[in-house]
Image (tube, rainbow, N blue to C red):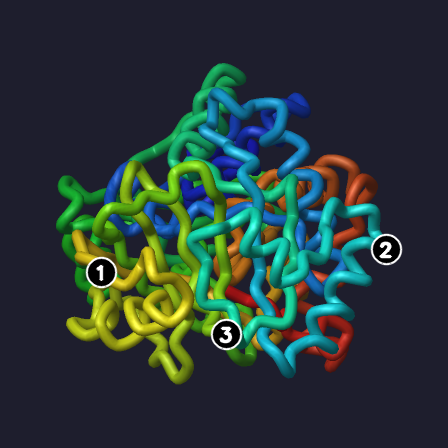
């Protein structure tokens, strides 16, 4: 089968790219995914936070352009600009104030709150003896990531983009000046999930199918690693589980508030009348793990919230899940041409911020493909070449990474 362009991965990034390329006039565009509506997508498993607050300029730019679109579509995509509150403890003043200065220097709407101002705006945060101050971002907020993904897809389909479900890609390469992928099709969601464990068995069982295109974009998130291995000396990407808990508090709800990041780096926000919380655990082992540790809530979430608020002392867990972050050495995304290739592109591994940077990333990659250069956003620093040439020190790891 010969087509113009192929996007591998229909999560938030792949769907955003399909939206922007088709909006710019690209035709005969196909998006391939083994699990179009199923449980494997990280888009379905994220916490829904959206913010501008990043240390690296490129990450601020990607978020800024994305949020500008979200503001225009608030009702359609469930974007609520209820703010982000970052709490800083005594001893963290220097790092916090440096972060605030950088954001204010880029005309982002962040302000410093004193402890008394924190208690005034967030009266339920009544255990504040350890706090030094907070950073508040009024234009940040919460988004329904699934609604955003569906918006991208719906608009792309209106322009003729075709989304293919239960298509498992086994390899991508260049041949005779064209991009080529080998794939197989499956008949059930279970089979689509099983391909992660034994892709070769699936290929032998269903037989290979070859598609040829002018270009292929790899946007498969944590699964991008396996398809890149033939093209790289080392794959760089690590899929890492991040756990989330949904719970309720006795005689308390926080529906009118937004995201709060505690000094413990437990983050929490209202979610459908309940409260959602998560935490990045240190020393999490890489792998495709979607389970929640039995003691995660009682050992990590509840103690931190108990120490912050008397309204959060009596909590009851409802459910929980794991989602995947795709980690890079400097905790920033990979965007650009696959090194050494002419028709293979990649856009993935945004380390948990794919939703909030999706449209910015789509703008950047679409311009690179259609205009052969970055224009609106210079994302050249996100090329994989930064690791292969030793220039990754230009992007230091994000300090406020959740």
**Residue at mark 1:** 314
Which x, y percent locates residue 143?
47, 38
**Quarter of the figure that contains the N terminus:** top left
Residue 212 relative to residue 197: left or right:
right
Which x, y percent locates residue 180?
49, 49
Q: Residues within 10 Å of mark 1 (few under 14, many from 20)?
A: some
Identify the residue at image location x=18%, y=63%: 201
**Residue at mark 2:** 105
Identify the residue at image location x=75%, y=69%: 97
Out of 244 and 147, give the one closest to the viewer: 244
Identify the residue at image location x=60%, y=60%: 333
Camera-nearest label, 2 or 1: 1
**Residue at mark 3:** 235
Identify the residue at image location x=47%, y=42%: 257
As helix, strand or loop, the secondary structure at mark 3 comes to loop
As helix, strand or loop, the secondary structure at mark 2 comes to helix
Mark sitting earlier along the chain (3/2): 2
Q: CA distance from mark 2 to mark 1?
A: 41 Å
Check the image and report above or below for 12 versus 20: below
The part of the image, by quadrant, that contains residue 194 is bottom left
């Amino acid at each position: 089968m010969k087509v113009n362009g192929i996007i591998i991965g229909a999560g938030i990034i792949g769907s955003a790219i399909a939206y922007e390329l088709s909006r710019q006039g690209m035709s005969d565009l196909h998006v391939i995914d083994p699990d179009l509506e199923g449980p494997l997508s990280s888009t379905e498993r994220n916490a829904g936070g959206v913010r501008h607050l990043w240390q690296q300029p490129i990450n601020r730019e990607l978020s800024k352009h994305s949020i500008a679109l979200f503001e225009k579509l608030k009702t359609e995509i469930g974007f609520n600009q209820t703010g982000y509150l970052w709490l800083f403890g005594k001893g963290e003043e220097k790092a916090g104030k440096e972060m605030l200065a950088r954001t204010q220097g880029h005309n982002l709407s962040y302000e410093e709150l004193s402890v008394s101002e924190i208690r005034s705006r967030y009266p339920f945060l009544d255990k504040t003896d350890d706090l030094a101050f907070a950073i508040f971002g009024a234009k940040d907020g919460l988004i329904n990531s699934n609604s955003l993904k569906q918006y991208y897809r719906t608009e792309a389909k209106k322009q003729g983009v075709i989304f293919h479900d239960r298509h498992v890609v086994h390899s991508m390469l260049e041949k005779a000046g064209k991009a080529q992928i080998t794939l197989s099709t499956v008949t059930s969601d279970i089979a689509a999930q099983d391909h992660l464990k034994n892709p070769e068995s699936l290929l032998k069982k269903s037989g290979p199918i070859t598609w040829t295109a002018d270009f292929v974009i790899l946007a498969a998130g944590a699964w991008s690693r396996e398809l890149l291995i033939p093209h790289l000396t080392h794959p760089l990407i690590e899929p890492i589980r991040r756990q989330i808990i949904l719970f309720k508090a006795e005689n308390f709800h926080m529906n009118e508030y937004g995201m709060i990041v505690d000094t413990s780096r437990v983050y929490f926000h209202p979610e459908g009348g309940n409260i959602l919380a998560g935490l990045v655990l240190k020393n999490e082992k890489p792998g495709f793990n979607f389970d929640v540790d039995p003691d995660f809530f009682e050992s990590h979430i509840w103690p931190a919230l108990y120490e912050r608020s008397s309204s959060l002392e009596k909590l009851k867990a409802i459910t929980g899940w794991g989602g995947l972050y795709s980690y890079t050495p400097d905790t920033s995304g990979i965007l650009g041409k696959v090194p050494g290739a002419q028709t293979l592109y990649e856009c993935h591994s945004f380390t948990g911020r794919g939703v909030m940077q999706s449209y910015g990333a789509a703008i950047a990659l679409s311009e690179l493909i259609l205009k052969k250069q970055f224009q609106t956003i210079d994302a050249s620093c996100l090329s994989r070449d930064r690791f292969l040439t030793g220039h990754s020190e230009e992007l230091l790891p994000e300090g406020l990474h959740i």
